[in-house]
Amino acid sequence: MTAALLEGVDERVGPRRQHLSPQVGTIVGVAASTLVRLGSIAERRWGLVTTAQAQDAGISRKQLSRMASSGAIERVAQSVYRMAGAPTQDHEAIYATWLALGGATAPRTDAGAASIVADGVTAAVLHDVGDFFLDGFDFIVPARKATRLPGVRLRIRQLSRDDVIPVDGLPSLTVERTIASLVELGTDLSLVANAVRDAVRADKLVAPDLLASYLSPIAARRKTDGRSLANDLFELAGVRPEGWSGD
């Protein structure tokens, strides 16, 4: 991405490049070194960079504002920018929200898991299972965390490394844990069954016994057990995962 940003720059221009602003149609000078620093950060995270990351790289908010005005970067969420020339991602709103929450810099938990993990419908959308409308952003954090980001819902849970899997670089609950989370959150079981169906058919639900164990504490509150609840979901979805006995 960095190379693409600088492609076509005349070396005779010197340490500053000229960028045509699509907003105002004028030529604005932008430091090439600044673009390189931002580009090196953004190319690791979907072409996006946060204000905090930029400041850590020695780039002030005032510089970011000028770059946004020139069209060198584009604001996509609170404190999150996309580099000019970077393609829009399918789940950019999720990525930007995770970055704005500090997901890229938050330390891992004592258990070795990521500190900010996609949960519920947000995780299901990332896994591309089910027919969900993203009406907000659900994440799991290990301790109380304040945020003013619109539409963000945070749940405090202690996760193990086995509970989390990266999806296109963003930490998410595994498919099995996602399905259990959807049930725990009170999602309509027909919608959960659709996610189960998609996951099984796409070979994304690979540990049905583990799903049953995740469902056990939820099932106990319903006077049943995890295997029975998992079996009900499989029957409702009209699928039977490989290796599932149903006993």
Image: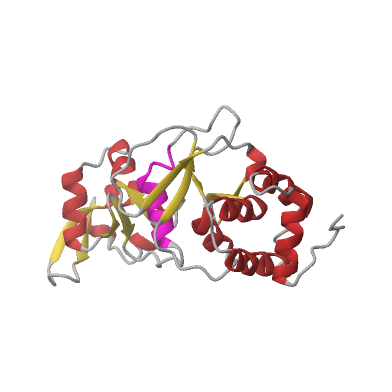
Residue 198, image x and y in percent? Answer: 66, 69
Quarter-of-image position of residue 147: top left
Q: Is residue 42 left or right of residue 130?
A: left
Residue 13: where, in percent of width, then height?
21, 58
Q: Residue furthest front?
A: 223
In the image, is residue 99 part of the stretch drawn in magenta? Answer: yes
Whether residue 59 is in magenta: the answer is no
Quarter of the image holding residue 154?
A: top left
Residue 182 drawn above or below residue 162 = below
Give how far across and how far down residue 150 sits, in percent. Answer: 30, 53
The main secondary structure of the magenta stretch is helix
Q: How is the image coloured?
A: secondary structure
| Foreground residue among 190 and 37 | 190
Q: Residue at x 21, y 50 (%)?
A: 64
Q: Which segment is the magenta one?
A: 92-105
Residue 147 against residue 110 in the figure, above or below: below
